[in-house]
Image (spheres, rainbow, N blue to C red):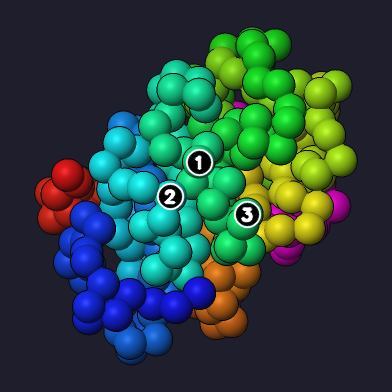
Amino acid sequence: MRPPSADTPAVGTHPVRDNGAVSSPDRTRILVVDNYDSFVFTIVVYLEQLGAVCTVVRNDAVSPADGADFDGVLISPGPGTPEEAGVSMAMIEACGERSQPMLGVCLGHQALGVVTGAVVGRAPELLHGKTSLVHHQGTGVLDGLPVPFTATRYHSLTIDPATVGPELVPNGHTASGVIMAAHHRDLPLHGVQFHPESVLTEGGHLLLANWLRVCGDEQAVERSAGLSPLVRDASAVAARVAVP
């Protein structure tokens, strides 16, 4: 993936503070598609702490082609269904066509499921700020996380395991079988149903660092060591980053 050039029109680009972790020219550039979600700026804080530069755009203020100028695309949580999430599914399809790293969180994870042919339906129970243990084999973005680990869930919809096709590989689940993480069989497309940015989720920084490594930042995992949730930073980012 090539970084935006000086001649490339900015797509909702906003100044992001330099955390000193890595020099600005070498920082991984991430496009964050905001599905009108209150958690998006906490995710941005985590990515910044890991050394990334984020551009945040609403799901109705960006086109799939705009994502091509970034090292990776993150599809945020949000209300509603994947079909109602603006450009989210089209962006995932475009990332797949470009073999571009993508991470879907909650609604973004469900959108990945739909794009690969799965059905998203009602979860066995509505969960709002509840935690569950996620069982996994340490693959994909879950590499290095405890087995199992605690994850925070905010969702009423989920990918129906019975409808998952050959393109989607579930790699994390609850004890009752709810899919908590999945990735494309051949492409760098990943999704997590839970919220890695929650203070109650174990290993959120490491999970995002694993994804940034997929995006090309080989030092992100090392940088994640010792980081812990700092929710107070989210309000500062929200005030600093004006979303169009």
Marks 3 and 2, how far apart at CA:
11 Å
Which residue is located at x 22 percent, y 81 percent? 6
Say which of 148 and 32 sits in front. 32
Within 10 Å of disc 2 (Cα), the crowding (few <14, some 14-19, many 20+) is some
Q: How many marks?
A: 3
Q: Write the start and end of the magenta stretch as one range.
A: 131-146
Q: Amino acid at mark 2?
A: Pro
Say which of 198 and 7 sits in front. 7
Asked if residue 174 shows in the view, the reply is no
Q: Amino acid at mark 3?
A: Gly
- Does 72 lie within the magenta span? no
Q: Position of residue 103 (x, y in %)?
A: 56, 51
Q: Which residue is mark 3?
A: 96
Q: Position of residue 225 (x, y in %)?
A: 54, 72
Which residue is located at x 60 percent, y 31 percent? 110
Say which of 190 and 222 sits in front. 190
